[in-house]
Amino acid sequence: MNLLIVNDAVVEVQTMQDNIPWPAYGIERVYTAFCVEDARDTIRQKPVDVLLCDIEMPGENGIALIRWIRTHNTNMGTEFLKRKPESAHFILTRAPDGSDPNRDLRSDKGEFFVV
């Protein structure tokens, strides 16, 4: 499986990429993007199975990226779904304003979770 980490905080992305033993979790490749547009380019060009995305980013946010993924019916998550059908993509964030990011995602399939 391949993972895409999307976060505007470069140090956080590098820390996750370098310090988490991804192969132990079945992740073969880790791609990174520092904004939504770069994430879209990666998704268009590379096979991505799992998304780890910040919600709060300058410009477009993580929810906009998820909506784009759903609108464009990408194949993202197909391998992961075979192994764990109850979840396919994850958002990793803290909502600094205390809002509920799940609210924007609940109305759809439910394969995205905020942790």
Image (tube, rainbow, N blue to C red):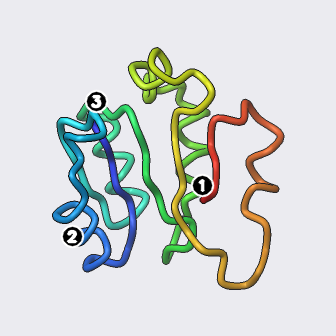
Q: CA distance from mark 2 to mark 3?
A: 19 Å
Quadrant of the image for the C terminus? bottom right
Asked if disc 2 and disc 3 are in contact, CB closer than 8 Å, the reply is: no
The image shows residue 35 at horizontal and vertical percentages of 38, 65
Q: Along the line of sight, which residue is nearer the eye, 42 or 113?
A: 113
Which comes sooner in the sequence, label 2 or label 3?
3
Q: Residue at x 74, y 47 (%)?
A: 105
Q: Residue at x 46, y 57 (%)?
A: 53
In the structure shown, which secondary structural element does the residue marked by tag 3 occupy? loop
Which comes sooner in the sequence, label 1 or label 3?
3
The image shows residue 68 at horizontal and vertical percentages of 56, 42
Residue 71 sits in quarter: top right
Q: Which residue is mark 1?
A: 64
Q: CA distance from mark 1 to mark 2?
A: 23 Å
Asked if disc 1 and disc 3 are in contact, CB closer than 8 Å, the reply is: no
The answer to whether residue 92 is left or right of residue 12 is right
The furthest residue to the front: 24
Which comes sooner in the sequence, label 1 or label 2?
2
Residue type at mark 1?
Ala
Label annotation for residue 14: 2
The answer to whether residue 10 is left or right of residue 87 is left
Q: Which residue is mark 3?
A: 1
Which of the two marks, 1 or 2, is nearer to us in this view?
2
In the structure shown, which secondary structural element does the residue marked by tag 2 occupy? helix
Quadrant of the image for the N terminus? top left
Asked if disc 1 and disc 2 are in contact, CB closer than 8 Å, the reply is: no
Q: Residue at x 28, y 44 (%)?
A: 42
Residue type at mark 3?
Met
In the structure shown, which secondary structural element does the residue marked by tag 1 occupy? helix
The image shows residue 51 at horizontal and vertical percentages of 43, 45
The answer to whether residue 69 is left or right of residue 48 is right
